């Protein structure tokens, strides 16, 4: 079979797969139906603070397998639904970040920095349109790179990044985020250190509880979902509720957010944000191809890179980053969305998930059977390779989801703009209850609510003290991976305490971490 034959076979496996029903005499494939259903589910969970794609994927996988079974024909419908969730949530996650200053996902935190100021200034509709256009543009670019470079790019990355290099890369990532995000490098480093402290509470690699104070609830560690959602979502909601209370006490009434302008995305706007979309799409795609590096880092790097570019190119009448610049939304959304397709490069080529959401695709493949991610997937042979057909079938489902994103996603964004008319004093408590409900459903334990309240209070204090919660979240998310990778690297190098300097790549990453801290601190002191 030729390469074109494999592509055609993958497309036909999706379009002419098992029939769900017939519409005007035209059969509708189960896989196509599942992609559409997953896409709408992804939009809803992405737009709801406290849910997000990871929780949706965790809940849907066992349900889907119980419905479709374990035969090979279930692979494309199940994975199609999960890809639909991944695509839809990239659009939906920006909605609460822009309208209510409450990120629907950790990736959308940077969107709040410019999205919410635009809402406060009466440009919510335009902010939503910028987020949609940037998100789908970055996602499409990433998918194209996946289709073209999947057979070779991930193999090259894995060849040059061994355990010491991966450990050094995580340290570089944490250093960059800690000192770049926020106004004070010292506060950023303190927030990152606090995140590392909390993530190491509970059972370590030696299965011995540490820092748990003999409390049963802490013996197994702090749930990542409760900590991240507590700091980002609950903390933001508490801060917004306090602002509303102060406004009520001062003015005697709540001031509704008025909207101005036509809210449309004009050609001149597209020309202004296009350079930021392009830069962030490249950054997000490159980060997505690295195993274990997620979209939150891509959003941060995209925003920081866009901010530096904006300071050089900003017109006198344009707002700065963090004060309602549409370029800030474009840089963030293009970066975190462009990770989605590139994350499947290490998944399909090496069987290594690039982020948490991609883990569920690997779990689905392992549970159902018939598809083993790895270099053998992209073996073009004269005798049909069924795994390669499934890979091109997955590419087809991603194209379908992208088409839905370009069309239905835009309509959804326009509809979500109506939510700004709902008084925040009524909406925020409902969002808070939905957040707690989603956490409780995940583990059916009141301990999840307790953790969320504790970290919500911590997030509120960070906001009051001017400390960005993002370094805390990144450190908490990457902390366990940092420990695991460092332990493995230490063991693999025969107990060498200087394993971080065992190769020129690792040395370059460590030197970069030190240089970023020194240069950033020096620049902040000069500008102070």
Image (cartoon, rainbow, N blue to C red):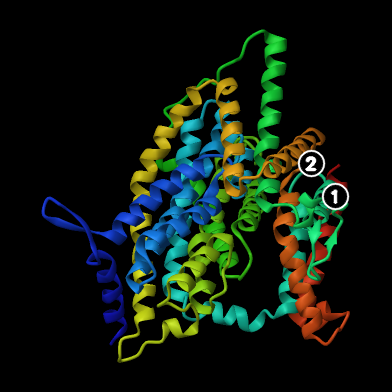
Q: Which residue is mark 1?
A: 190
Tell me the residue at 79%/56% (across/down).
Answer: 219
Quick one: 272 or 192, which is closer to the camera? 192
Tell me the residue at 78%/39% (across/down).
Answer: 458
- The residue furthest left is 25
Tell me the residue at 85%/50% (across/down).
Answer: 190
* Residue 324 % position (x, y): 60, 35
Tell me the residue at 61%/80% (across/down).
Answer: 158
Of the 4 image quadrants, the one containing the C terminus is top right
- Whether residue 403 is visible to the viewer of this picture, yes or no, is no
Q: In terms of sequence position, does the residue under pointer 2 or pointer 1 come before the other?
A: 1
* Residue 350 % position (x, y): 54, 78
- How many other residues sit within 10 Å of disc 1, few (<14), some (14-19) or many (≥20)? some
* Residue 120 % position (x, y): 58, 26
Q: Is residue 457 above or below residue 110?
A: above
Q: Residue 78's quadrant in the figure?
A: bottom left
Q: Which residue is mark 2?
A: 467
* Residue 431 % position (x, y): 57, 32
Q: Is residue 442 above or below residue 396?
A: above
Quick one: 4 or 389, which is closer to the camera? 389
Left or right, 63 with respect to 257, comes to left
Which structural element holds mark 1? helix
Which structural element holds mark 2? loop
How much space separates mark 2 and mark 1, taking CA atoms? 9 Å
Left or right, 219 with respect to 79, comes to right
Left or right, 161 with respect to 326, comes to right
Of the 4 image quadrants, the one containing the N terminus is bottom left
- Whether residue 470 is visible to the viewer of this picture, yes or no, is yes
- How many other residues sit within 10 Å of disc 2, few (<14), some (14-19) or many (≥20)? many
Report if the CB atoms under discs 2 and 1 are less than 8 Å apart.
Answer: yes
Quick one: 141 or 416, which is closer to the camera? 416
């Amino acid at each position: 079979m030729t390469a074109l034959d494999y592509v055609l076979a993958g497309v036909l496996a999706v379009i002419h797969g098992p029939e769900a029903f017939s519409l005007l005499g035209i059969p509708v494939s189960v896989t196509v139906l599942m992609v559409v259903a997953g896409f709408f589910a992804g939009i809803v969970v992405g737009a709801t603070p406290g849910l997000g794609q990871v929780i949706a994927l965790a809940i849907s996988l066992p349900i889907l397998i119980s419905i479709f079974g374990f035969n090979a024909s279930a692979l494309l419908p199940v994975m199609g639904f999960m890809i639909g969730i991944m695509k839809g949530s990239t659009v939906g996650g920006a909605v609460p970040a822009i309208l209510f200053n409450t990120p629907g996902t950790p990736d959308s935190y940077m969107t709040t920095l410019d999205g919410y100021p635009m809402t406060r200034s009466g440009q919510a509709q335009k902010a939503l349109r910028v987020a949609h256009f940037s998100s789908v543009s970055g996602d499409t670019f990433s998918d194209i790179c996946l289709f073209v470079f999947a057979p070779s790019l991930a193999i090259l990355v894995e060849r040059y990044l061994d355990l010491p290099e991966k450990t050094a890369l995580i340290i570089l990532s944490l250093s960059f985020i800690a000192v770049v995000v926020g106004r004070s490098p010292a506060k950023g480093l303190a927030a990152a250190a606090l995140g590392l402290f909390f993530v190491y509470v509970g059972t370590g690699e030696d299965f011995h509880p540490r820092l748990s104070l003999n409390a049963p609830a802490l013996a197994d560690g702090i749930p990542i979902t409760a900590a991240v959602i507590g700091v980002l979502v609950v903390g933001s909601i508490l801060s917004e509720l306090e602002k509303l209370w102060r406004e009520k006490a001062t003015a005697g009434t709540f001031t509704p957010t008025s909207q101005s302008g036509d809210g449309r995305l004009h050609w001149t706007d597209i020309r202004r944000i296009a350079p930021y979309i392009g830069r962030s799409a490249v950054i997000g795609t490159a980060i997505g191809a690295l195993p274990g590096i997620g979209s939150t880092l891509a959003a941060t790097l995209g925003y920081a890179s866009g901010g530096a570019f904006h300071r050089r190119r900003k017109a006198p009448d344009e707002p700065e980053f963090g004060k309602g610049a549409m370029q800030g939304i474009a840089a963030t959304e293009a970066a975190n969305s462009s990770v989605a397709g590139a994350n499947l490069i290490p998944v399909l080529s090496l069987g290594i998930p690039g982020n948490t959401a991609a883990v569920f695709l690997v779990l689905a493949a392992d549970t159902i059977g018939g598809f083993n991610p790895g270099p053998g997937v992209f073996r073009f042979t004269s005798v049909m390779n069924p795994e390669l057909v499934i890979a091109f079938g997955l590419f087809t489902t991603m194209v379908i989801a992208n088409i839905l994103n370009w069309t239905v996603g835009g309509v959804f964004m326009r509809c979500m703009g109506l939510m700004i008319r709902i008084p925040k004093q009524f909406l925020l408590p409902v969002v808070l209850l939905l957040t707690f409900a989603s956490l409780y459903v995940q583990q059916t334990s009141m301990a999840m609510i307790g953790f969320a309240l504790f970290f919500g209070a911590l997030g509120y204090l960070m906001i009051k003290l001017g400390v960005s919660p993002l370094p805390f979240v990144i450190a908490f998310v990457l902390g366990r991976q940092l420990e695991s990778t460092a332990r493995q690297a230490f063991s693999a190098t025969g107990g060498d305490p200087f394993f971080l300097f065992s190769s020129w790549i690792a040395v370059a990453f460590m030197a970069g971490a030190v240089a970023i801290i020194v240069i950033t601190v020096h620049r902040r002191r000069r500008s102070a």
